């Protein structure tokens, strides 16, 4: 699996002699190493090195089978230069979009201007998932689904938004997750109009809308889901908004498939919401890729013309947010297929009143 992923780099750009990989998620994707502060040096001819320090060498030797592990003692630049000399590398391509400008500048100086920015995005290579990756994402989604079912029994008037987060965290850790994939959003009452309303000490009250957005990290792979529920009762306007959002999401899920542009999917949901006069109340993108990062390519946004491919994993999460009133968002994770999509999130999307 590792060899196949590495081959993608050199197939995309025949001019690459060697590549230096620095972004943590890309290091993991290409080598299977799960630690921090480590780097890859890979040549077209098949030489593969993982550069790390004493803190991670033992771990690396256990996790990495196709890379030679180098415990560099001095400056990283010196270790890179030695590898370039030993493999007769005249040009080294780096993740210029990820590395700090100061680091790249110093590399160019130390390595005599033989540093070039990659013309391809390693993040883009990760956008199409293999079977192993999809299975891990499915597990992360499954834990989140179970956590949502659990939290419905916990939510009641008098508990705080932070209480909900704490209970979710306890549940997912007890059920196999490494933790949350991002800081959870629990926004109740009028605060539910905040798309990224992270939890506070606010107490949940009877009549509140409660927007819950969270995900799990399972073996490095992320999940992401949102459901909006109601405590005690729900106002008529909110019922209307809920069903508009639900229908917009369903239309997007029915439309999405391989070969379409990302912005075409966004347009389906956005247009439906706009037909009810709420266009300006849906201010974020329809969705985003999910994998080793919680936000990856592709982005289902009005400006994205990225063409969807089979086995891309994306969220579909339309929403309507009305200031000083409340908001609704519903979010699933789906796997893009040639003739549609596989919806991984199983939690009910029926209007739930607790």
Image: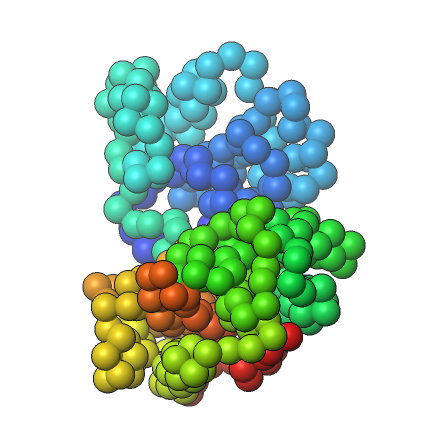
Q: Percent position (x, y) of residue 213?
A: 52, 61
The quadrant of the rendering that contains the C terminus is bottom right
Between 270 and 237, the one lying in front of the other is 237
Q: Percent position (x, y) of residue 129?
A: 50, 64
Query: Considering only vertical position in the picture, is 292 above or below 129?
Result: above
Between 252 and 119, the one lying in front of the other is 252
Residue under the image location 44 percent in, 35 percent down: 22
Q: Quadrant of residue 241?
A: bottom left
Residue furthest out toward the right? 174
Residue under the image location 55 percent in, 84 percent down: 350
Q: Going by the image, does 157 lie left or right of 226?
A: right
- The answer to whether one can see residue 8 in this image is no
Q: Going by the image, does 110 lie left or right of 347?
A: left
- The answer to whether one can see residue 103 in this image is yes
Residue under the image location 28 percent in, 27 percent down: 101
Q: Percent position (x, y) of residue 223?
A: 56, 61
Between 139 and 99, the one lying in front of the other is 139
Residue under the image location 65 percent in, 21 percent down: 54
Query: Considering only vertical position in the picture, is 191 above or below 328?
Result: above
Query: Considering only vertical position in the picture, is 115 above or below 239?
Result: above
């Amino acid at each position: 699996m590792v060899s196949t992923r590495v081959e993608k780099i050199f197939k995309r750009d025949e001019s690459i002699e060697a590549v230096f990989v620095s972004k943590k998620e890309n290091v993991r994707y290409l080598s299977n190493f799960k630690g921090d502060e480590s780097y890859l040096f890979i040549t077209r001819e098949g030489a593969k090195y993982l550069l790390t320090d004493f803190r991670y060498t033992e771990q690396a030797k256990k996790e990495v089978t196709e890379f030679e592990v180098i415990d560099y003692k001095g400056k990283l630049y010196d270790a890179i230069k030695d590898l370039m000399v030993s493999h007769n590398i005249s040009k080294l391509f780096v993740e210029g979009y990820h590395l700090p400008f100061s680091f790249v500048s110093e590399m160019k100086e130390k390595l005599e201007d033989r540093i070039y920015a990659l013309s391809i995005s390693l993040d883009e290579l990760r956008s199409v998932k293999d079977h192993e990756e999809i299975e891990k994402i499915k597990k992360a989604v499954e834990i989140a689904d179970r956590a949502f079912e659990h939290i419905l029994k916990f939510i009641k008037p008098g508990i705080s938004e932070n209480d909900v987060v704490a209970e979710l965290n306890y549940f997912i850790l007890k059920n196999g997750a490494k933790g949350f994939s991002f800081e959870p959003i629990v926004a109740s009452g009028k605060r539910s109009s905040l798309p990224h309303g992270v939890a506070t000490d606010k107490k949940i009250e009877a009549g509140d809308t409660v927007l819950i957005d969270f995900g799990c990290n399972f073996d490095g792979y992320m999940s992401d889901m949102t459901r909006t529920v109601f405590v005690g009762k729900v106002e008529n306007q909110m019922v209307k908004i809920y069903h508009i959002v639900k229908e917009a999401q369903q239309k997007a899920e029915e439309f999405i498939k391989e070969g379409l542009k990302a912005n075409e999917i966004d347009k389906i949901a956005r247009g439906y919401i706009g037909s009810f006069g709420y266009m300006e109340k849906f201010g974020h993108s329809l969705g985003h890729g999910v994998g080793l990062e919680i936000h990856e390519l592709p982005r289902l946004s009005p400006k994205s013309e990225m063409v969807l491919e089979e086995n891309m994993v994306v969220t579909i999460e339309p929403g309507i947010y009305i200031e000083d009133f409340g908001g609704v968002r519903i979010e699933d994770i789906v796997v893009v297929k040639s003739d549609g999509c596989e919806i991984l999130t199983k939690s009910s999307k029926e209007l739930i009143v607790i």
